[in-house]
Image: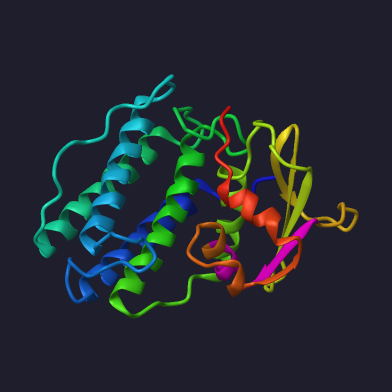
Amino acid sequence: MIDSLEFSALLQLIDERSAAFRSAVAAAPGLDAPVPSCPEWTLFDLVKHLGTGQRWWAAIVAAGPAKAPPAKDAAEAPRELEALLAWYTESNELLLSALREAGPERECWTWWSAGVSPANAWGVARRRVHEVLVHTYDAQLAAGAVQPMPVDVAIDGVAEFLDTCNSTPAAWPHEPATIHYHATEGRSWLLTLDGTGAWPAPLTDDAAPASASATGTAEQLLLFVWGRLTMSDLKIDGDPQVFEHLIAWEPEE
């Protein structure tokens, strides 16, 4: 089940998180600053990655239903801070404009079309909220001033990652397993892994016992599933190898 978020709220979150991203970049010691959570990347690389992504998804949404995505924008991002931030602002507005024009129901190409998240503008908007959210954390880390994530956004971020990145009909290549994620703010999720694929759902009282579970704040869980934190940063119960297998899994549909 996907949390019901209004399309307009998603667009507002993209805008708000992008403002926080720009602020973190502006506060960093320089564009050559390393990004500890993205090995071998500088802050310039991070801004270029996120801005190029915003432009690409703008083109994808604008194209509507398609069997393949359009080519990524080959234009180089400027290397001077003020110009780079202006380029990123333009990139973000291109995405927001494309989403507003499309409306939430417009179908489009997505790499997650076989999973739980819908292959439409709403699904793209939700994905980009959390792409910007996590990369804002990356930028703040590079700037040496990490700020807490909004709790409600982090909670949806865990659910969105499971819906988008951990849902697939590709058969799980190991023994069937169930994973429970528990956020200390009161939300929990279930991920089932078996021959039918990987399928997330809210955790109910009658759910099967967990093969493994992870407990932490919503922000910690979000950063864990995105590869920014490790099992040592959370309370892990059950078989940790299940998490190791999931992290290493690259399903082919």
Q: Is residue 92 left or right of residue 238?
A: left
The residue shown at (23%, 74%) is 28
Q: Report the front residue among 48 and 173.
A: 173
Q: How many marks?
A: 0
User: Is residue 236 placed above or below 116 in the rendered structure?
Assistant: below
Q: Nearer the viewer, residue 87 or 233?
A: 233
Image side of residue 175 versus residue 142, left or right:
right
Q: Quadrant of residue 232?
A: bottom right
Q: Residue at x 70, y 54 (%)?
A: 242
Residue sitting at the far bottom: 145
Q: Position of residue 193 (x, y in %)?
A: 73, 43
Residue in the image at 48% along x and 71% along y: 149
Residue at 60% x, 62% y: name it. 155
Give the quadrant of the N terminus.
top right
Q: Would you place residue 176 above or below residue 252 in this image?
A: below
Q: Quadrant of the C terminus?
A: top right
Asked whether the viewer can see residue 233, the reply is yes
Q: Position of residue 135 (x, y in %)?
A: 38, 60
Picture coordinates of residue 217 (x, y %)?
Answer: 62, 73
Horizontal side of residue 117 vs 132, given as left or right: right
Q: Is residue 4 visible?
A: no
Residue 100 drawn in magenta: no
Chain part drawn in magenta = 211-222
> Relative to 219, does residue 125 appear above or below in the rendering?
above
Quadrant of the image occupied by residue 166: top right
